[in-house]
Image (cartoon, grey):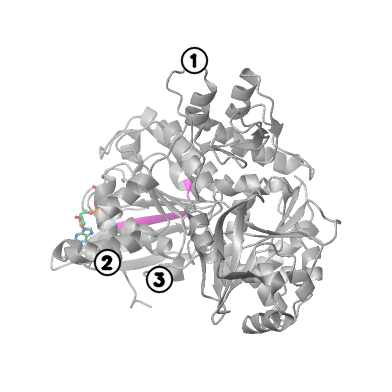
C-alpha cells in the first residue's frame, strides 16, 4: 500500500494550463542566453503570474525566479510567487500553496476561498528538542574549536572566520556538528548534521524536501550580492574558514535536487558561483540548477583536476582564491572563438571517462558500446510486440535511478501500478508476491528512489504531456524521461500501419522531445513499435515506425531482436544500431531471468 501511496503523491502534478508557457520560458531563456548581459532578468510580462497580478492591479517586484508582492495576511512585502509554477510562500507568515490556491484567494467572488494556514516545519520542532543540549560554535573555547577542526582534518581554517557562520552548533558530547537551514534568512526550516568521527556521515532534516539553505555572510562588502554555492557541509566550512569576501551558501540536498521552495532564499543574489565536485553528476547538476536559478547570474568553477571540490582543493593545498577567480559563465555569445570554450574543452578532455556518461551497473556490455547514459540525448527503443521492451527499459532506468538520476516515467500503455510491480520485482531481484513479508521493507527503500510517474494513461494530447514533463523537470530536477510508448500516447495502440497524417503527427512528437532533451539537458527515451515486418525478418533502423525523421533525430537507437535458433528456441539480443556520440555499434545478449524479471548482464564483462 505504501508503495502505491508514494507513486500517487509523486505523480501529483498540479499543472495549471498556463504552464504551457514554460515552452516560451525555455525559448526565452535560450534567446536571452545569447544576448544577455549579467543583469538581465527574464521579462515577466509574458507569464501567467504577472498577467494575473496586472489584471488585479497588484503591484509586484520582478525578481530572478519569483515575483514579490505584499502578503495580504501579514502585510509584509515577503510573498514570493514562482514565475514558472505559480507556487507561493510568504517568508514572513509562512503561508504557502499552489497557484490554484493563490488564484482562489485573490478571487474575491469565490465563496469557498481556501485560506492557507501558516506552515509548520516539523524539522523546527525536532531542532528545538535538541537545542538545549547544543552549544553555539562561536561560544566554544579555542581548544574545543581546534579539536573539532582536527577531527574534520581542517586544522588550518581560520577560527575567527568560522565564528561568523550563523547557526553552527556542536552537541554536548562533541560528537556532531549542526548547521541550521534557513528560509529567506529568517526562519529555521531544517538542519544538517555531520558526525565528527566520520565526516562522510551527514544527514539533512527533513531529507525529502528541505526548504532552506545555510548562508554565511561575508566579512567585507566587496561582493555583497555575490554568493558561492556549494553542495556539502564540509565545503561550506572550508570556504568559510578561508575566504571572507563572498556569501557562502550550502544547499540542503547536495547535487541531487534544487527544490523550488529554496528559490526565494536566493533572490537577493545577483551573482551565484556554483562550485560543486568535479564529477559528471555534479557538473550536470550545476548546469541544470543554473537553468532554474536563471543562467545569466550563474558562474561556474569548471571541474578539472586543478579545480576539484572546495574540500579537496583545501586538502591538496590549492589556492582557493585563485580557483574562485576562474569562475565564468556558461552562457556564451552567439559567435565565439576557441579561447571562450577552451577551459570547457580541457575539462571534458580531462574527465573523458566521466563525460561518457553514467554507467549501468547491470549492463556492462552497454557501457562498452554506448559509453554511458548522457544527459541531453534522445534514445529510441524498438522491438517486436511482446519482446520485452517495457521489461528491459524498466530495469535499464531503475539501474540509473538507483544511482541517483531523477527519472520520470510516462507509462501510457500499462498502468503505473503494474509498472511499479515490475520495477519492485527487479529492485528486489525476486518475486515479491511469494514473500509479502518483504513488502514494507522493500517499499520503504523503493520510495526513496528519485522515481516519478505521470498519471496519464492511454492517448494524450502532446501539449498536455509536455506541460507535465517540463513541470517535472523544473520541480524535481528530472534527468531522464521515459515515454512508453509513443504510439499509445498518440492513440494508435499497437496498430502497425498508419497514414501520412499519423507519420506527420509522430514526427512532430519526436521533434518536440528532441528539442526538449537538448534545451533542458535531460535524456529522453522513447519506446516505439516497429513498422510491420515479416515475423522472420530482423528489425533494422528502417523498421522504426514513422518517417526517417525519427531515426535522424535520435542519438541512440536500440532494437530488441528475436533470433530463432535451429532448436526453434528464441534467443534475444539488444542491437545498438545508432550511437551518435562515439559511433560504436554492437549487440548485447539478453538472457531473461523470470524470477527477477531481469536482463542483467553483470557477469558479461
Ligand atoms: N526474454 C523474455 N523471455 C520471456 N518472457 C519475457 C521476456 N522478456 C519479457 N518477457 C515477458 O513478456 C511479457 C511482455 O513483456 P513486455 O511488456 O516487456 O514486452 P513489450 O515489448 O513491451 O510488449 P508490447 O509490444 O506489448 O509493448 C511480460 O510478461 C514479460 O515478463
258 or 284, which lies in front?
A: 258
54 or 185, which lies in front?
A: 185
Residue 570 has which mark? none
> Disc 1 or 3, which lies upstream in sequence?
1
Horizontal and vertical percent for residue 149? 67, 80
44 or 577, which lies in front?
A: 44
Disc 1 versus disc 3: nearer the observer: 1
Query: In terms of secondary structure, where does tag 3 sit?
Result: loop
Q: What span is in magenta?
A: 552-560
User: On the rendering, which quadrant does ligand 1 occupy?
Assistant: bottom left
| 280 horizontally vs 587: left or right | right
> Gap in Å between the C-alphas at discs 2 and 3?
15 Å
Residue 281 visible in image: no
Q: Residue furthest front?
A: 132
Residue under circle 3? 361
**Residue 547 is one of the magenta-drawn residues:** no
Is residue 133 placed above or below 31 in the rendered structure? Answer: below
> Gap in Å between the C-alphas at discs 1 and 3?
57 Å
What residue appears at the point 66 percent right and 72 percent down from the top-left corner? 350
> Disc 2 or 1, which lies upstream in sequence?
1
Residue under circle 2? 428
> Disc 2 or 3, which lies upstream in sequence?
3
Quarter-wise, where is residue 60 in the image?
Answer: top right
Residue under circle 1? 109
Amino acid at each position: 500500500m505504501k508503495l502505491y501511496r508514494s507513486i500517487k503523491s509523486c505523480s501529483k502534478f498540479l499543472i495549471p494550463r498556463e504552464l504551457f508557457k514554460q515552452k516560451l520560458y525555455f525559448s526565452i531563456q535560450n534567446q536571452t542566453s545569447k544576448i544577455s548581459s549579467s543583469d538581465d532578468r527574464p521579462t515577466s510580462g509574458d507569464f501567467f503570474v504577472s498577467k494575473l497580478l496586472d489584471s488585479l492591479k497588484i503591484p509586484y517586484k520582478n525578481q530572478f525566479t519569483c515575483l514579490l508582492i505584499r502578503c495580504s495576511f501579514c502585510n509584509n512585502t515577503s510573498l514570493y510567487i514562482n514565475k514558472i509554477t505559480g507556487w507561493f510562500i510568504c517568508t514572513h507568515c509562512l503561508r504557502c500553496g499552489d497557484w490554484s490556491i493563490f488564484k482562489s484567494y485573490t478571487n474575491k467572488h469565490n465563496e469557498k476561498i481556501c485560506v492557507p494556514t501558516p506552515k509548520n516545519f516539523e524539522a523546527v520542532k525536532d531542532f528545538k528538542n535538541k537545542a538545549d543540549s547544543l552549544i553555539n560554535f562561536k561560544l566554544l573555547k579555542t581548544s574545543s574549536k581546534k579539536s573539532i577542526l582536527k577531527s574534520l582534518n581542517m586544522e588550518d581554517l581560520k577560527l575567527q572566520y568560522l565564528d561568523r557562520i550563523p547557526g553552527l552548533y556542536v552537541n554536548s558530547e562533541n560528537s556532531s556538528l549542526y548547521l541550521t537551514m534557513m528560509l529567506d534568512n529568517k526562519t529555521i526550516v531544517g538542519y544538517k548534521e555531520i558526525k565528527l568521527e566520520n565526516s562522510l556521515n551527514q544527514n539533512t532534516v527533513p531529507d525529502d524536501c528541505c526548504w532552506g539553505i545555510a548562508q554565511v555572510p561575508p566579512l567585507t562588502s566587496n561582493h555583497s550580492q555575490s554568493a558561492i554555492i556549494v553542495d556539502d557541509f564540509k565545503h561550506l566550512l572550508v570556504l568559510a574558514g578561508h575566504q571572507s569576501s563572498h556569501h557562502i551558501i550550502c544547499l540542503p540536498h547536495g547535487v541531487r535536487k534544487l527544490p523550488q521552495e529554496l528559490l526565494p532564499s536566493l533572490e537577493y543574489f545577483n551573482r551565484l558561483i556554483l562550485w560543486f565536485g568535479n564529477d559528471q553528476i555534479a557538473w550536470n547538476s550545476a548546469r541544470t540548477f543554473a537553468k532554474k536559478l536563471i543562467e545569466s547570474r550563474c558562474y561556474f568553477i569548471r571541474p578539472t583536476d586543478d579545480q576539484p571540490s572546495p574540500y579537496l582543493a583545501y586538502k591538496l593545498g590549492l589556492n582557493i582564491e585563485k580557483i574562485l577567480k576562474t569562475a565564468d559563465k556558461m552562457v556564451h555569445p552567439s559567435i565565439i572563438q576557441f579561447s571562450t570554450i577552451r577551459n570547457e574543452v580541457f575539462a571534458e578532455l580531462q574527465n573523458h571517462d566521466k563525460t561518457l556518461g553514467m554507467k549501468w551497473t547491470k549492463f556492462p556490455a552497454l557501457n562498452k558500446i554506448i559509453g554511458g547514459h548522457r544527459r541531453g540525448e534522445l534514445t529510441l527503443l524498438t522491438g517486436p510486440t511482446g519482446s520485452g521492451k517495457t521489461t528491459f527499459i524498466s530495469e535499464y532506468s531503475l539501474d540509473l535511478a538507483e544511482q541517483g538520476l531523477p527519472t520520470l516515467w510516462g507509462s501510457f500503455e500499462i498502468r503505473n501500478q503494474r509498472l511499479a510491480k515490475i520495477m519492485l520485482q527487479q529492485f528486489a531481484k525476486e518475486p515479491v508476491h511469494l514473500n509479502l513479508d518483504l513488502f514494507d521493507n522493500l517499499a520503504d527503500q523503493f520510495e526513496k528512489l528519485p522515481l516519478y510517474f505521470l498519471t496519464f494513461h492511454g492517448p494524450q494530447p502532446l501539449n498536455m504531456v509536455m506541460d507535465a514533463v517540463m513541470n517535472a523537470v523544473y520541480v524535481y530536477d528530472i534527468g531522464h524521461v521515459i515515454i512508453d510508448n509513443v504510439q499509445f500516447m498518440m492513440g494508435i495502440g499497437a496498430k502497425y500501419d498508419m497514414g501520412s497524417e499519423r507519420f506527420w503527427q509522430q514526427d512532430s512528437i519526436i521533434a518536440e522531445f528532441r528539442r526538449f532533451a537538448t534545451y533542458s539537458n535531460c535524456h529522453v527515451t522513447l519506446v516505439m513499435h516497429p513498422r510491420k515486418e515479416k515475423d522472420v525478418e530482423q528489425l533494422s533502423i528502417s523498421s522504426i515506425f514513422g518517417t526517417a525523421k525519427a531515426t535522424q533525430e535520435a542519438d541512440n537507437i536500440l532494437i530488441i531482436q528475436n533470433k530463432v535458433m535451429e532448436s526453434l528456441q528464441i534467443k534475444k539480443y539488444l542491437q545498438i544500431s545508432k550511437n551518435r556520440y562515439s559511433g560504436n555499434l554492437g549487440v548485447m545478449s539478453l538472457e531473461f531471468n523470470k524470477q527477477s524479471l531481469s536482463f542483467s548482464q553483470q557477469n558479461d564483462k
